Amino acid sequence: MIEHPEGAAAGSDPYYIVSASVAADLPKLVLKHQDSFFVADRRGDFPNLPASEFGFYVDGTRFLARLELRLEGNWPVVLNSAVSEDTLEVAVDLANPDVVEGDRIALLGRTVRLARRMTMYQNQLYQTLTVESFAEGPHEIVVR
């Protein structure tokens, strides 16, 4: 447990989360419903950053500290991200970066779209991922 200075507002808040300076300037997406919330980066990920606030919390306990989406081992490119007005859903539209195999581009960037939707209801977090290809022919990709 981290001690707070005498009289600090955070010391009286049982759900206060200490944030790391490394994550302080990163754009964040925040969902909240009742006693549950999550803090994600602009891709919808909970990156593995030491002492960061990223994650999924219920009643002040972090239940999920790391959740990262990769396409062919790379971070997808963010096209757009938005949180609903009721803070129950986040929509993130992503695309693939150039996929390089050896000395050639096997799949041009922005050929595959990933529509990531994360919805929070009560103490549960749901994620739906839709993959849409605009490639002229078939192409095998690894989503992890």
Image (tube, rainbow, N blue to C red):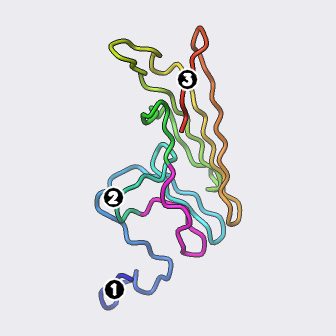
Residue 44 lies left or right of residue 8; in this view the side is right
Marks 1 and 2 close (CB-CB < 8 Å): no
Residue 26 lies left or right of residue 133; in this view the side is left
* CA distance for labels 3 and 1: 47 Å
- Along the polypeptide, which appears first: circle 1 or circle 2? 1
Among the 4 quarters of the image, the one containing residue 112: top right
Is 142 rendered above or below residue 35?
above
Residue farthest to the top, as pictured:
136
Which one is in front in this view, the residue at disc 2 or the one at disc 3? 3
Dot 1, crowdedness within 10 Å: few (<14), some or many (≥20)? few
Q: Residue at x 58, y 32 (%)?
A: 114
Of residue 108 and residue 89, the one placed in the foreground of this image is 108
Residue farthest to the front, as pictured:
102
Residue farthest to the right, as pictured:
122
Q: Secondary structure at mark 3?
A: strand
Q: Amino acid at mark 2?
A: Ala
* CA distance for labels 2 and 3: 31 Å
Point out residue 74 in the picture as x, y percentages from the top left corner.
42, 34
The part of the chain drawn in magenta is 53-67
Marks 3 and 1 close (CB-CB < 8 Å): no
* CA distance for labels 1 and 2: 20 Å
Q: Which mark is residue 24?
A: 2
Dot 3, crowdedness within 10 Å: few (<14), some or many (≥20)? many
